Image (cartoon, rainbow, N blue to C red):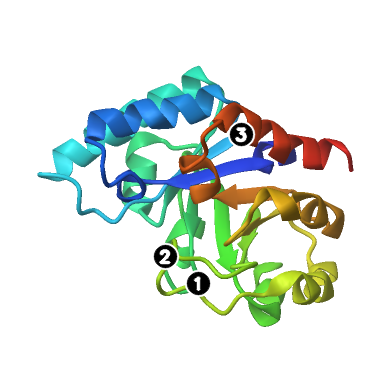
Amino acid sequence: MKIEQLQCYLVAGPQDYPELSLTEFIVQIEVLMQSGITAYQFRDKGTHYQNCEERLDLVLKLQFLAKKWQVLFIINDDVDLAQQIHADGLHVGQGDQIQAALKVPQALPMVIGLSVSNASELAAAQDSGADYLGIGPIFATQSKTDAAPALGLAKLAEILPQNHLPIVGIGGITESVLSDLAELGLNGVAVISMLTRSDNPIETVQKIKEAWHGI
């Protein structure tokens, strides 16, 4: 993984487009890939499928598109699925499947991402074996109902100096704070609605990348 691949990181699943069919969802994700996102994390609720085969078929189609557009393809939480399809990476949360993730056979090398939400988790993550971290929520978000309390810019600035791993911010991020987050030392942002609800995804992706190109 190159650090630049974390700059514009989309997190999304069918639940983020509830009005669309699975076929239409794939079309929307490819639009965002074409727009220049650097990484895509498939995070779903498992509620939009008739069976496991339909979910696997969807993931394989998304993986094909990610390779086509040279986008880092990450699976959220599902260690077995990530290994089955030889995904580029796997992202897990605190207490999810971190130990299983870190035991993925070396024959199946994968980028491992870990979510952290406070100073103690950030400190512990430094020696966890993770390749990159996702820190947040930075701001209040409606995308995750069980999210930890928002950190805010001041707290983020206070705890980031203890970090030595590639790291992205997530949670309630808008265009107005991109430059602030880049200046604090984050390597990129992981976003949902900022991209899934964008009227001009190409422009939104450009604004995200521009914030880091100026650092």
Q: Indicate which label's residue lies in the foreground, 1 or 3.
A: 3
Q: Please, what secondary structure does the residue beneath circle 3 have?
A: loop
Label 1 to label 3: alpha-carbon separation: 24 Å
Residue type of the residue flagged with mark 3:
Thr
On residue 97, the disc is 2
Mark 2 neighbour class, 10 Å CA radius: few under 14, some 14 to 19, many 20 or more: some
Q: Position of residue 20 (x, y in %)?
A: 26, 37
Q: Position of residue 139 (x, y in %)?
A: 62, 68
Q: Nearer the viewer, residue 133 or 128?
A: 133
Specify whether 91 is left or right of 209: left
Hey, which residue is sitting farthest left in the picture?
A: 50
Of the two numbered discs 2 and 3 on the same chain, state the one appearing first in sequence. 3
Where is mark 1, residue-wise?
94
Residue type of the residue flagged with mark 1:
Gln
Q: Indicate which label's residue lies in the foreground, 2 or 3.
A: 3
Hey, which residue is sitting farthest right in the picture?
A: 215
